[in-house]
Image (cartoon, rainbow, N blue to C red):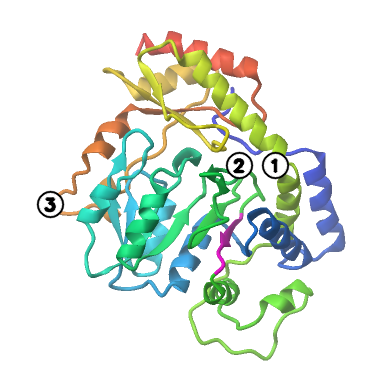
Amino acid sequence: MIRLSKSSLNEKEKQSVMGVLDREYLGMGVEVQKFEKNLSVFFNRPALCVVNGTAALHLALQACGIGSGDEVLVQSLTYIASFQAISATGAKPIACDIVPETITLDLNDAEKRLTSKTKAIMPVHYSGGVGQLNKIYDFAKEHNLRIIEDAAHAFGSSYKGKRVGSFGDIACFSFDGIKNITSGEGGCIVTEDEFILQKVQDARLLGVEKDTEKRYSESRSWDFDVTEQGWRYHMSNIMAAIGIVQLDRFQEIQEKRRNLATHYTYCLKDNSNFSFIDHDYSEVVPHIFPIQIRGSFDRDKLIRAMAEAGVQTGYHYHPNHLLTLYSKKPPHFLPNTETIFPTLLTLPLHEDLSFQDVDFISSTLNHTYGNC
């Protein structure tokens, strides 16, 4: 079976983890500090590591003072983590439509949903692209909104020549097992806002004030104060050990992902039933490779048929406004989202794929689609 997504590790990551295990200090310590320093160099601004990308979003929102009674604009077609991070603060995620060509936030739709309760906007960088990010920043400035970028898909991507995370308000990344780089689990928050950084540092360690420096020295605070709600969201040395090596290898990782995505477009371009997001792969580092399928077809049958042929596929994502927890009465209709969602199919993309694999996947899809 050719897997849809997977972690791609080599002996360097394994040796790095063994170094932590041999030292027998598994919690947050020197490896986490080193990973944060390396990420800060990568982004040219401060980065703080946490246990996963959802925690990064949650802590960023909380640090911005967003909570009960507030609203956050976010596209519905995203992973549930975006919505759960918002509702975890007590705030309400306001589901917005997407721009069909990029599957990113439709700013015109978002503007219609703006109220006096709106405190932030969360653009989701779907598949590595950022959509109308400059216009989103102009919109946020006009309406005095914080921007928390859900950049889980966009590690390494650039926008107008600048690396995502190296500019703007707050960007949150995920390092789970299948992202552009992994630390097994993990995530980070990148910002130049010193107030936000201090809030996040404390909140990730159960609200224990100024405990981060203690942890870096592999000690801990015994006599401390807590003044705000915190969470057990810190990263471990085991995670950071993997992340350090993955970041060192990122040049080869991004080239492989870009080349595979480019090869997919070449292999499938002659089938008029398939369309792709028109990414510039000199800027975008793709996390997934979604296609849209025109015409009438049975997606579940197609997924089963591809699996029988040895190819795992899926789709990203089920719209959040159609989930019970976030659905509204009367129903909340988002025309672009609800039209595009049934047409989406995600093809395998990870560093262990070969170009021959992409050839096989593409030819299998071309053949199988006609039977579904």
**Magenta region: which residues?**
186-192
Front residue of 223/270: it is 270
Up the image or down, 157 lies above or below 282; here it is below
| Residue assigned mark 2 | 180
Quadrant of the rendered image containing residue 157: top right
Up the image or down, 253 lies above or below 214; here it is above
* Circle 2 or circle 3, nearest the eye: 2
Residue furthest to the left: 330
Residue 147 image position (x, y, % from top left)? 42, 61
Distance CA(mark 3)–CA(mark 1): 47 Å
Answer whether labels 2 and 3 touch (C-beta < 8 Å).
no
The amino acid at mark 2 is Asn
Answer few, some or many: residues within 10 Å of disc 1's Cα (few below 14, many 20 plus, some between 14 and 19).
some
**Residue 99 as seen in the image, left or right of residue 47:** left
**Residue 278 as seen in the image, left or right of residue 267:** left
Q: Which mark is residue 250?
A: 1
Which quadrant of the figure contains the N terminus? Answer: top right
Residue in view at x 72 percent, y 58 percent: 35
| Residue assigned mark 3 | 330
Q: Is residue 87 visible?
A: yes
Up the image or down, 63 lies above or below 191; here it is below
* Circle 2 or circle 1, nearest the eye: 1
Residue 357 image position (x, y, % from top left)? 61, 18
Residue in view at x 54 percent, y 30 percent: 4
Residue in view at x 52 percent, y 16 percent: 266
